[in-house]
Image (cartoon, rainbow, N blue to C red):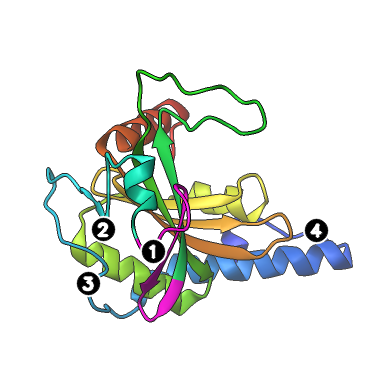
């Protein structure tokens, strides 16, 4: 991919360097599908299969069940060894957990259950992203791809993430730009209800 096909960088020196760096990262991301396939990241599934979770984290688990797992230090944070490294995992529930700072309380009649498993896979590197992409594509059907328009918006700073969806948004491969400009990769597993909300959001906004 030629970055110049999407636009031009401003001439101001500091801005120019940051812009050119972003274009190089976006170009690497677009070319990442040429990477090699690694061993399976998760269980394979067909088009209509429902993903039940990741490792011993299963959708529908309560906070207490999650906290009882050896790898989890709290209801929302776990640490698993994945592909040779310890990876931090953030968990979310539905309905949302009550906030200790006075946020909206959770109804006693609606026990929060696990809906999203968000795995931090480290900083973006072309080969690493390619490996993850191929690993996931070998296990799950690819259902949502990044468009050139989304690449352009990302490169110009109008959006801070790029998302590839597998198995109808039950699995997401996401590149996220932090406030200081560095990019990180996340692999996200979603329950059927969370995946449906994601698809509805994409349909309403016109893109992942």
- Mark 3 vs mark 1: which is more N-terminal? 3
Find out whether residue 19 is within the magenta segment: no
Q: Which residue is mark 3?
A: 40
Task: Please identify, in this view, whether the residue under mark 4 or under mark 2 is nearer the observer.
Answer: 2
Find out whether residue 76 is within the magenta segment: yes
- Mark 1 vs mark 4: which is more N-terminal? 4
Write the residue at 32% across / 38% down. 195
Q: Which residue is mark 1?
A: 71
Write the residue at 51% across / 48% down. 150
Task: Please identify, in this view, whether the residue under mark 3 or under mark 4 is nearer the observer.
Answer: 3
Label number found at residue 56? 2
Q: Which residues are magenta?
A: 70-86
Q: Quadrant of residue 59?
A: top left
- Mark 2 vs mark 1: which is more N-terminal? 2
- Mark 4 vs mark 2: which is more N-terminal? 4
Q: Position of residue 138 (x, y in %)?
A: 20, 66
Secondary structure beneath dot 1 equals loop
Marks 4 and 2 in Cβ contact (< 8 Å): no
Q: Position of residue 5 (x, y in %)?
A: 57, 60
Label number found at residue 52? none
Q: Is residue 144 above or below residue 103?
A: below
Q: Between residues 93 and 121, which one lies in front from this camera angle?
A: 93
């Amino acid at each position: 991919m030629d970055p110049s096909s999407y636009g031009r960088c401003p001439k101001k020196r500091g801005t120019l360097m940051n812009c050119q760096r972003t274009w190089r990262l976006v170009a690497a991301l677009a070319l990442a599908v040429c990477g090699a396939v690694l061993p399976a990241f998760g269980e394979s599934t067909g088009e209509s299969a429902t993903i039940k979770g990741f490792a011993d984290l299963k959708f529908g688990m309560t906070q207490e069940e999650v906290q009882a797992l050896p790898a989890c230090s709290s209801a929302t944070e776990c640490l698993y060894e994945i592909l040779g490294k310890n990876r931090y995992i953030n968990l979310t529930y539905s309905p949302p957990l009550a906030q200790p700072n006075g946020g909206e309380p959770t109804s006693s009649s609606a026990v929060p259950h696990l809906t999203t498993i968000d795995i931090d896979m480290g900083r973006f590197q072309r080969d690493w992203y390619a490996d993850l992409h191929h690993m996931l594509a070998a296990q799950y059907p690819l259902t949502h791809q990044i468009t050139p328009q989304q690449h352009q918006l990302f490169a110009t700073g109008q959006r801070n993430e790029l998302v590839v969806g597998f198995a109808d948004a039950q699995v997401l491969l996401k590149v996220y730009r932090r406030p200081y400009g560095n990019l990180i990769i996340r692999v996200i597993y979603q329950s059927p209800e969370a995946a449906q909300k994601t698809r509805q959001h994409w349909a309403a906004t016109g893109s992942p």
